[in-house]
Every structure is written in structure tokens, then in C-alpha cells.
Amino acid sequence: MENSSQWIDDLFVQRGELFLQILNHLWHQSEPIVDGIVELAQANGVASGKVLDICCGNGRIAIPLARRGFDVIGIDISKILIEDAKSKAQEFDVKNRTKFIVADVRKIESALKEEGRFNLIISVWTSIGYYDEDTDVEILRQAKSLAKPNGLLIIDTVNRDAFMASSLDRLKVYNDYGKLVVLEEPTPDYSASRVTTKWRFYSKDGNDLKYIDTVEYNVRQYSFHELVRILSKAGWTMLGAYDNLRTLQPFTPKSSRIIVVARAL
């Protein structure tokens, strides 16, 4: 299957207002995730300082971190999401602790060259795997160049092995995001460890659903050992692995997600 990144523009830029509805609906779920990030950061020597939130969306993680005293810079390719993040930063009175920048994650080194270095870098909700493996290594290498000595990286992504094993049971999944309903239809490519998913968007119209649009995206998923390998290639060393930011239980092959904490070498 040809690996195209056009879907990133289709979903996050051209249809950013739809994805914004999803993020706004998920906003109330942010605090337990931020609890886990803060706990992991503190356990590894980062109790304060500067945070870089890669693919930050509308700030649903960055803003709660700022409310806990961190200085946070978030980057995202979507102007719609970044503008909403700026608005929310003002609403939650953390404008002086946040900065949101429209930028391509593949160019973070140049986009943030004037921002100094970071104590903690985070990538949450499977924001890795949008491109190919070589590109992911380069993104992680650039992130490492932006980290302070012994800076931390926390990645939250789907566990390829668990997803592929269960994919036959989830050929179609309906997700309810308030006034928006999304039908997900994943098609796994086992040989390439990629998943092509159609998102069909519907708005609620009384008891009926009104079709809005369809987007197809294609993501590279990583097994645990693959993720550790590309982190090492990019200059990071793993400190720990967990199954969920809410529970911080040890990672197992059956975990639906992989939470990795790594340190800049």
C-alpha cells in the first residue's frame, strides 16, 4: 500500500473543524491523562520546567499542564486547532505559561530554534506513525536535539500487536462525540504494520444521523520492541513502559497502548 501523508491535511487542516469537535468532547478526559504524565515526569526528576507538546491539537493536554505550573509550547499543523488552543489558554488563565505554534512536526527543530530547550517532550494519542519509520526516527531525533541534557520524552501510542490481534473484532466502530458521530472502519495491513481507517462523520438530527463527510487515514503502528529501537536510533534510552497513562500499570503484550518514558542520551 502506498504511504501517503495527504490525509493529514485532509483531516487536520481541511476538516479541522470536525476534528476540533472530537477534541472538545474529549476535553473532560484530559485530567487523568495529565495526572499520569506529571507522575511519570516527577518520578524521573522533572517536577517543573519547559514542556513541548508535539501535535498538541487544541491544547487539551498542554493547558492542564500549564495550570500545574509547567511552561508549555504546543505545535500542531492545524491552524484551526492552534487558534482554539490560544483561546482556551486565555479562558483558563494560562496565556502567560503557554505558546501555541502552527508547525509541521517534521520541521520542529527549525520551528522552535528560538525557544530554547525542554525538560519534557510529550507525544500523546498516537501522534507518531503518521509518516514512515525513517521520518519518525527523524522527528524523534529533532525532538532529542530540543531536549535539555537528561530531558525526558513520554510517548503514548497504540500497541500494534494488541490492535492487530483484535482487529477482526472491530471492523466497524461507532464513536459518539456529543453532536458528532464517527463510524470508524479500519483495514489492517499486517505485512506493513499499517492501518488504513475510514472515518465517516455524521451529525445528530433528532433520532437520525445526517452524513457530513468521509476521511481516510493511514498510520504506521509500532510493536514495543520497534518503538524502543527507533527511540534508540534517535538518541533516546528507555526508562520504563506502561499500559495506560491513567493507571500506569506495567506494559504487557496485551496492553492496548504503549506508554514509553525515555531520556535524552
Image (cartoon, rainbow, N blue to C red):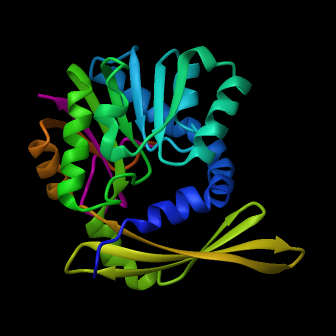
Q: Is residue 31 above or below residue 171?
A: above
Q: Position of residue 21 (x, y in %)?
A: 69, 55
Q: Quadrant of the N terminus?
A: bottom left
Left-right relation of 231 to 116: left
Left-right relation of 103 to 45: right
Q: Nearer the viewer, residue 146 or 39?
A: 146
Q: Is residue 228 magenta?
A: no
Q: Is residue 254 magenta?
A: yes
Residue at image location 36% in from the left, 28% down from the top? 112
Q: Is residue 252 above or below residue 50?
A: below
Residue at image location 62% in from the left, 50% down from the top? 23
Q: Position of residue 59 (x, y in %)?
A: 57, 37
**Within the image, what quadrant is residue 178 found in?**
bottom right
**Within the image, what quadrant is residue 149 found in?**
top left
Q: Is residue 18 above or below residue 37?
A: below
Q: Position of residue 265 (x, y in %)?
A: 11, 28
Bounds of the magenta span? 247-265
Q: Position of residue 214 (x, y in %)?
A: 60, 77
Residue at image location 34% in from the left, 80% down from the top? 188
Residue at image location 21% in from the left, 32% down from the top? 144
**Within the image, what quadrant is residue 44 found in?**
top left
Q: Is residue 31 above or below residue 29?
A: above
Number of dots carrying numbers? 0
Q: Nearer the viewer, residue 202 or 207?
A: 202
